[in-house]
Image: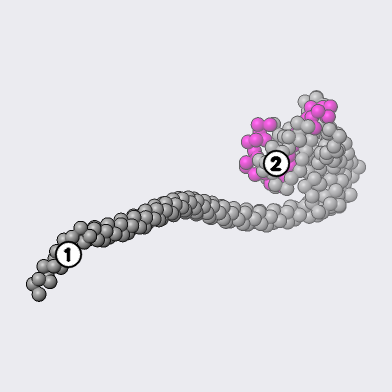
Amino acid sequence: MAKEQVNAQNNANTPKAGNDRLEQALLRLTNEVAQLAHGQNELRNFVAQLAQGQQQLQEVVTRLTVGQEQLQAAVTNLTEEQKRLVQGQQQLQEIVARLTIGQEQLQAAVTNLTEEQRQLTQRHQKLEEVVTHLIESQQQMQQLMAELSDSNRKMVGILKEVNKKVGRIDEQLGLSVEAVAQVVLPPYLEKKHGIKLKGEPGYELRPLFVFVNGEREQIDLYGEGTKDGEEVCVVCECKARIYERDVRAFVRKLSRWELYLKKRVVAVLFGFLVHPSAEWIAKVHRIILVGALQR
């Protein structure tokens, strides 16, 4: 048995046995190198895949960054739009507040006008009562004058003039401002301002139309006469109530009319009532203000 083992060991130490071991070792080494090369290829593929994934990730990150910037810009735009909407709402609220104040002021103005109209109606009624009393007095005077002798003919003539004037009032009981002015103004202008108007009593002042730049304009009342020996013409505008704005409007009309009137103009504004605001501006432009209920 020991002899066989020695023989086997001797056989293993022979050159042929050494070559076999070398071939096996080379074979194993080749396999390992092949496996290593395969693993290296797989590693390169993995690295390539990893680089590609990293590039794709970078592209995703870039798109996310751009999207975030766009979202931020959209949020900024929405914020600005919201600010503008808030400002617009505030402006709308301010406009509504101003409209409310304007409506209240308009309501107050309407109330004032209603009150003024009521007062004007009352004064109108009082004027009617005065005229009625004047007519009754005139009738009584006619009865008395009928009993006078021929020596009182001059007084009868005066009575006839009064009768004509009162008769015109009687015919126009509507008491338009112009009708009252036609009766009241001639004696008033003569007494207060020394202006003597021409024409029949009650007809010294009449409406007149003038053409200004091809347009026909009406002068409420016009009359001619003398003042201190000078020929003058009276230009009168009639208003129920005279305010500062009416005086200013009359001044503008006079500037147009004076070019077409031959004589020196005496400007008169006649109304039932004259507001204090009209007095100073009338003095500035030398306009005679006459209030039928304030004389």
Label ID, residue 11 = 1
User: Looking at the picture, which amino acid does disc 2 mark?
Assistant: Asp
Task: Read off the magenta span.
Answer: 257-285
Q: Is residue 211 above or below residue 77?
A: above
The residue tagged 2 is 246
Query: Is 74 in front, or is 186?
Result: 74
Residue at (65, 44) in percent of width and height: 275
Question: How many marks do you count on the picture?
Answer: 2
Q: Position of residue 241 (x, y in %)?
A: 70, 47
Q: Which residue is at a point 66% across and 54% down the rendered structure image? A: 113
Q: Nearer the viewer, residue 250 or 26?
A: 26
Please provide percent x and percent y for residue 180: 79, 46
- Camera-nearest label, 1 or 2: 1
Amino acid at dot 1: Asn
Q: Quadrant of the C terminus?
A: top right
Q: Nearer the viewer, residue 69 or 8?
A: 8
- In the image, 160: left or right of 131? right
Q: Residue at x 76, y 43 (%)?
A: 238
Secondary-structure class at tag 1: helix
